[in-house]
């Protein structure tokens, strides 16, 4: 058996990405949904729409912050911007404060501190989400992912909600596949 005892869908097993680009695993704890290579500029979700990306987290991880990185297009006329962490079932675990009109320049990492740090009690795929309301939503550093094709295979990136402002929805309701997969770092 080529997959050993693994019985899941290989594409959903994102654990191998968690050590990508770690400068010193003992000095800088983080989890990432993508390696640092092969990334490019991808569109974020439309204004007021949440984009959530699959992020494999391990039991015992303590997640306090979510960081997204803008690409070549800066945000303009920002009114709301927040990040949130969702459980594997899509239930809200914690969100950041709304950064309202705080500037977001091109090629800039922006860290969103969760209101309450989350201790992960079960290893699995969680959802790191970002919503920005602006006249120009910044583009993000990320990659392109394929639409799920196998039964039980999940999205790597998805959109949900509309007209979101300062508050993350209680659940990720009616997610829609999104080809662009933004990079997220959880610390």
Image (cartoon, grey):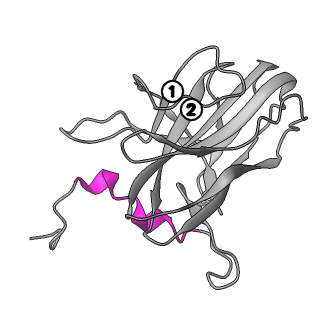
Check the image and name the residue furthest to the left: 1
Q: Quadrant of residue 13?
A: bottom left
Instruction: State yes or no: residue 147 in magenta.
Output: no
Query: What residue lies at 69% left-to-right and 76% top-to-bottom?
Result: 28
Asked if the residue at tag 1 contacts the one at tag 2, i.e. Cβ–Cβ closer than 8 Å, the answer is yes
Seen in the picture, residue 123 relative to 161 is either above or below; the reply is below
Q: Alpha-carbon distance for marks 2 and 1?
A: 4 Å
Query: Considering the image in quadrants, where does the N terminus appear?
Result: bottom left
Q: Position of residue 26 (x, y in %)?
A: 64, 85
Q: In the displayed structure, does residue 5 sit left or right of residue 50? A: left
Instruction: Say which element carries label 2.
Output: strand
Q: How many residues crowd mark 1 within 10 Å: few (<14), some (14–19), many (20+)?
A: many
Magenta residue span: 9-20
Query: Considering the image in quadrants, where does the C terminus appear?
Result: bottom right
Which label was assigned to residue 51? 2
Query: What residue lies at 83% left-to-right and 47% top-to-bottom?
Result: 108
Residue 139 vs residue 49, the one in the foreground: 49
Q: Position of residue 163 (x, y in %)?
A: 64, 14
The residue that mark 1 highlights is 159
* Residue 30 visible in the displayed image: yes
């Amino acid at each position: 058996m080529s997959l050993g005892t693994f019985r899941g869908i290989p594409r959903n097993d994102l654990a191998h990405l968690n050590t990508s680009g770690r400068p010193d695993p003992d000095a800088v704890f983080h989890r990432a949904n993508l390696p640092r290579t092969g990334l490019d500029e991808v569109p974020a979700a439309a204004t007021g729409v949440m984009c959530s990306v699959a992020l494999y987290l391990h039991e015992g991880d303590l997640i306090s912050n979510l960081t997204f990185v803008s690409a070549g297009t800066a945000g303009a006329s920002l009114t709301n911007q927040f990040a949130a962490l969702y459980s594997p079932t899509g239930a809200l675990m914690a969100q950041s404060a709304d950064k309202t009109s705080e500037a977001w320049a091109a090629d800039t990492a922006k860290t969103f501190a969760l209101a309450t740090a989350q201790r992960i009690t079960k290893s699995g795929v969680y959802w790191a989400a970002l919503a920005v309301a602006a006249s120009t939503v910044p583009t993000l550093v990320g990659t392109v992912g394929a639409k799920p094709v196998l039964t039980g295979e999940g999205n790597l990136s998805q959109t949900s909600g509309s007209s979101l402002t300062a508050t993350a929805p209680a659940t990720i309701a009616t997610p829609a596949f999104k080809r662009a997969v933004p990079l997220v770092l959880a610390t």
